[in-house]
Image (spheres, grey):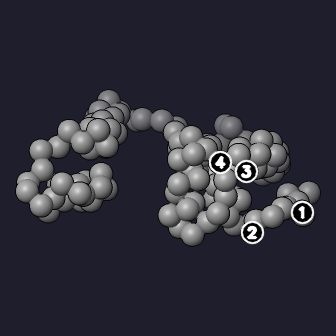
Amino acid sequence: MAISFKGAHFPTEVILMGVRWYVAYPLSTRHVEELMEARGGDLDHTTINRCVIKYSPQLEEAFHRRKRHVWARPMLGFKSFKAAQGTLAGIELMHMLKKKQLVVEAGDEGRTAAEQFYALAA
């Protein structure tokens, strides 16, 4: 049984993007609303919350209909301490950049966290 978006006021792609961002990343509905506005979408944070409540259970049910057997999946999570350490270092780096803890040169004060991240490699 397919998920029905009949009666929805927004395109299916927009609804699914908002729901995915909310459930996949540590974002509030207001953060998702801002991201949608930046990409030309016009979903209110309450609409995003309603979509999550309505469509998440339906998406989970669709997933379980197609789920592989557990015994056939490869190992999940970190396979070594080195992998965990490297991943956590990257996560902490992004947190520090978002908190504006990087000393920036004159003229670079307006850079976003993403721009600062890419500038570190330059």
Marks 3 and 1, the one that precedes in the sequence: 1
Looking at numbered disc 4 in the image, what kind of residue is underneath it? His
Q: Is residue 109 left or right of residue 76?
A: left
The numbered dot on residue 11 is: 2
Element assignment for label 4: helix
The image shows residue 73 at horizontal and vertical percentages of 61, 43
Element at label 2: loop
Residue position marked by numbered label 3 in the rendering? 47
Which circle marks residue 7 in the picture? 1
Camera-near label (4 vs 1) is 4
In the displayed orientation, state which residue is furthest to the top: 81
Task: Tell me residue 63's x, y (percent).
Answer: 76, 48
Q: Which amino acid type is marked by label 2?
A: Pro
**Residue contact between numbered discs 4 and 2, judged by CB atoms under 8 Å:** no
The first of marks 2 and 3 along the sequence is 2
Q: CA distance from mark 4 to mark 2?
A: 16 Å
Most foreground residue, 102 or 69: 102
Local SS, label 1: loop
Element under label 3?
Answer: helix
Q: Residue at x 81, y 46 (%)?
A: 54
| Front position among marks 2 and 3 | 3
Residue at image position (83%, 62%) is: 8
Q: Earlier in the sequence, mark 4 or mark 2?
A: 2
Check residue 45 in the rendering and tell me which mark sits there, or answer none. 4
Mark 1: few/some/many CA within 10 Å (<14, 14-19, 20+): few
